[in-house]
Image: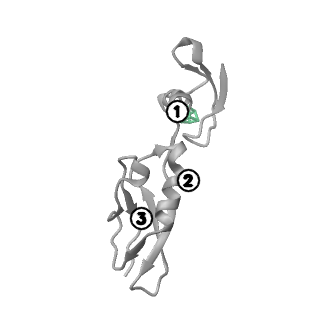
Amino acid sequence: MTELICIGCPRGCHLKVDEENDYAVTGNNCNVGAEYGRNELINPTRTLTTTVRLTNSVHHSLPVKSAHPIPKKDLFKAMEELNGIEVPAPVKCGDVVYRNVADSGVDVIATRDLD
Ligand code: SF4
């Protein structure tokens, strides 16, 4: 049995995940917690948020995020890849600035407009 605190909302439900019973989750107040608890033990993922270097602009950095959560184990590799890129302005919110980060199949997108 593994105990976790759900990060799905500020309520912070205390979850128990039973690995010996098909990862059954108790202590959750909604299905978000059940899914979070199960995934956290089987394949934990996170949405990556960071900045990348911006060129052709008075601004020097562009806020970005992964379009979907990526495996937690790949976050460092993803950060290394993004540390090495430059994105030319102008950029629109939602533009794909990097494809298939850390071979996850997930793209990285801009989270604001910058000229
Ligand atoms: S289980 Fe549901 S209600 Fe509880 S913290 Fe997670 S998201 Fe919030």
Q: Which mark is residue 36?
A: 1
> Which element carries disc 2, helix, strand or loop?
helix
Within-10-Å neighbours for mark 2: few <14, some 14–19, many 20+: few
**Amino acid tagged 3:** Thr
Q: Is mark 3 within 8 Å of ligand 1?
A: no
Q: Is residue 48 left or right of residue 91?
A: right
User: Can you tell which of label 3 and label 2 is closer to the viewer?
Assistant: 2
Q: Number of callouts in the render?
A: 3
Nearest the camera: 61 or 105?
Answer: 105
Spatial separation of the CA atoms under disc 2 and disc 1: 21 Å
User: Can you tell which of label 2 and label 1 is closer to the viewer?
Assistant: 2
Within-10-Å neighbours for mark 3: few <14, some 14–19, many 20+: many
Instruction: Kindly identify which residue carries mark 2.
Output: 76
> Which element carries disc 1, helix, strand or loop?
helix
Above or below, comparing residue 95 to residue 77 in the picture: below
Nearest the camera: 16 or 78?
Answer: 78
Q: Residue at x 48, y 50 (%)?
A: 47
Instruction: Kindly identify which residue carries mark 3.
Output: 111
Q: Residue furthest top?
A: 21
Name the image colouring.
one colour
Image quadrant holding the N terminus, namely top right
Residue 40, horizontal then vertical, whole percent: 55, 33
Q: Is mark 1 within 8 Å of ligand 1?
A: yes
Within-10-Å neighbours for mark 1: few <14, some 14–19, many 20+: many
**Amino acid tagged 2:** Phe
* Disc 1 to disc 3: CB gap under 8 Å: no
Which of the 4 image quarters holds residue 14?
Answer: top right
Mark nearer the N terminus (1 vs 3):
1
